[in-house]
Amino acid sequence: MAAMSELILTQTEDHVGVCTLNRPEVLNALSVELMDQLIAALEAFDNDPNVYVMVITGSEKVFAAGADIADMAEASVVEMMEHNYLARWLRIKAIRKPIIAAVSGYALGGGCELAMHCDIIIASESAKFGQPEINIGVMPGAGGTQRLTRAIGKFKAMEVILNGRFLSAQEAFEAGLVTRVVAKEQFLAEAMRLAHQIAQRPPIALKLAKEAVLKADEMSLSEGLEYERKLFYSLFATEDQKEGMRAFLEKRKAAYKGK
Ligand code: DAK
């Protein structure tokens, strides 16, 4: 089933919901309208019991070249605060189902930060990641200083953020920002292949596993281990836990229901 809105194209394929950024004339710059459509699409997939995994992608040429500079150029600090951009990003952070970013071409500024809000990043060999806000008089504002530093470490992140240098797909992979690099023609197919594989897993366990991994950035090790254990125990209240373990013992494929 395919539906089309102006700036985000959405499609559902089996249990995978796909959002395609569609503002090619400005390299998918993340305007307020585009962000609102993206968030609406992601939240709709998050609430759709038929969707287990999501993919966010752009085109072969560009994932997203950042927030829309034209929206911000003349803004006052009051306007920036009143727009409450951060609240939009918190809604993306709050999506519970796994999200795969399929990145080709530029993923810059807010585009890189959007990819880093996802849980897995599949990059085409032409992908370029960067936080070039320093070149336009500012700095990252949607988590770049925190998430990039956690992903690739202080000393690599500092160069990217302080000097606005782009990382190639290969560099990003070697630094730990990217899950896998594939040929340009393959990046979306590979992301979809992985999404379909993950969508075979029990949907509630997927959500809780994502939640637990994300806590690793926010909690101490002992708090995180405690949190993980509670989520682990809670899965024994699901039908899918019984089905998964029985299917293993009966040497058959599990039929998960998301219950
Ligand atoms: N915004 C608006 N328009 C953009 C754009 C952007 N980010 N990036 C590209 N465009 C437009 C260009 O102006 C051009 O438009 P026309 O001239 O055709 O009208 C068209 O897209 C094609 O771009 P170029 O002609 O520049 O294409 P090139 O291939 O020569 O260069 C490039 C590609 C990606 C290297 C270049 O376009 C570029 O440097 N773009 C800007 C990259 C950038 O600085 N990105 C960071 C933006 S700041 C926050 C949340 C988020 C953020 C901040 C706060 N809060 C929650 C508080 C995020 C901030 C940012 O991302």
Image (cartoon, helix red, strand yellow):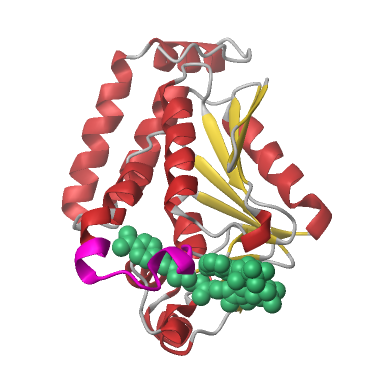
Q: Position of residue 127 (x, y in %)?
A: 67, 66
Q: Nearer the viewer, residue 31 or 241?
A: 31
Q: Is residue 173 visible from the viewing direction of this image?
A: no
Magenta stretch: includes residue 169: no
Circle count: 0
View quadrant of ligand 1:
bottom right
- From this viewpoint, which residue is outermost toward the right? 185
Q: Nearer the viewer, residue 197 or 168?
A: 168
Q: Position of residue 108 (x, y in %)?
A: 53, 69
Q: Does residue 204 lie above or below 31 as drawn? A: above
Q: Nearer the viewer, residue 59 or 171?
A: 59
- Tell me if 20 is positioned left or right of 97 in this view: right
Residue appearing at x 53%, y 14% in the figure: 249
- Tell me if 223 is positioned left or right of 152 in this view: left
- From this viewpoint, which residue is outermost toward the front? 74
Residue appearing at x 21%, y 40% in the figure: 227
Q: Does residue 91 lie above or below 26 as drawn? A: above
Residue appearing at x 22%, y 70% in the figure: 77
Task: Locate the C terminus and report the quarter of the image it occupies.
Answer: top left
Q: Position of residue 144 (x, y in %)?
A: 38, 68
Q: Which residues are magenta?
A: 67-80
Magenta stretch: includes residue 72: yes
Q: Is residue 2 visible from the viewing direction of this image?
A: yes
- Tell me if 201 is positioned left or right of 113 in this view: right
Q: Position of residue 166 (x, y in %)?
A: 58, 79
Task: Locate the N terminus and report the quarter of the image it occupies.
Answer: top right
Task: Tell me which corner region of the image, top left, top right, bottom left or bottom right, holds residue 253.
Answer: top right
Residue appearing at x 21%, y 32% in the figure: 230
Task: Tell me which corner region of the image, top left, top right, bottom left or bottom right, holds residue 170.
Answer: bottom right
